[in-house]
Amino acid sequence: MPQTVITLSTRGQGLYEFTDPAADFVRASASGSGEGLLTVFVRHTSCSLLIQENADPDVKTDLNAFFRRLVPPSSDPSMRWIVHTTEGPDDMPAHIKAALTQVSIGIPVMNGRLTLGTWQGIYLFEHRDRPHRREVVLHLSA
């Protein structure tokens, strides 16, 4: 069963699309009937994965704004209850955001292609302020 690890470089909080590398992996790896399941897994606890619209950049802007309002930095007065602050005011909020989203996604494969909808893309959702190098595992099962 084919699998690979791709590395994504982030520039801080935001959504980083990687649909094309995932689709390329599926095209190169699909065999037989070309049907199966792509499992996408991120190997970190302060970022997550989303399938989201990739046509209008305002969607990314609004999602970022929503999650910042939902879970502000631990330096915000509303977050005084947070205990884990050793790694900075964005770290524990990043763990909370990752817990609210997902670190693994399954996408059906038909005819050797991802079955994403017309406007759907696969995103890494970075929850930390600083740039990071994130590893995403792609696993194709028949």
Image: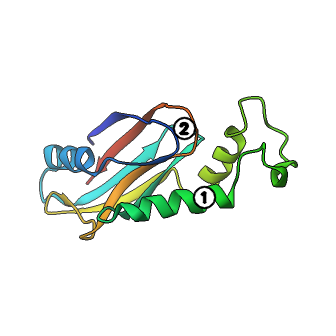
The local crowd at label 2, few if under 14, some if 14 to 19, many if 20 or more residues have their Cα within 10 Å, is few
Pinpoint residue 41: horizontal percent, then vertical percent.
Answer: 44, 46
Badge 2 or badge 1: first in the primary sequence: 2
Pinpoint residue 51: horizontal percent, then vertical percent.
Answer: 40, 61
Mark 2: which amino acid? His
Going 78% across and 35% down the picture, which residue do you hit?
A: 85
**Callout 1 secondary element:** helix
Q: Nearer the viewer, residue 106 or 141?
A: 106
Q: Of the numbered discs in the image, which one, if any, rests on residue 139?
A: none
Figure check: 116 above or below 126? below
Going 52% across and 44% down the picture, which residue do you hit?
A: 13
Mark 1: which amino acid? Phe
Q: Quadrant of the C terminus?
A: bottom left
Going 14% across and 50% down the picture, which residue do you hit?
A: 31
Q: Is residue 124 left or right of residue 38?
A: right
Which residue is denoted by mark 2 in the rendering?
44
Q: Pointers 2 and 1 in contact (CB under 8 A)?
A: no
Figure check: 106 above or below 42? below
How many marks on residues? 2
> Please, which colouring scheme is shown?
rainbow
Q: Is residue 31 left or right of residue 43?
A: left
The local crowd at label 1, few if under 14, some if 14 to 19, many if 20 or more residues have their Cα within 10 Å, is some
Q: Of the numbered discs in the image, which one, if any, rests on residue 67?
A: 1
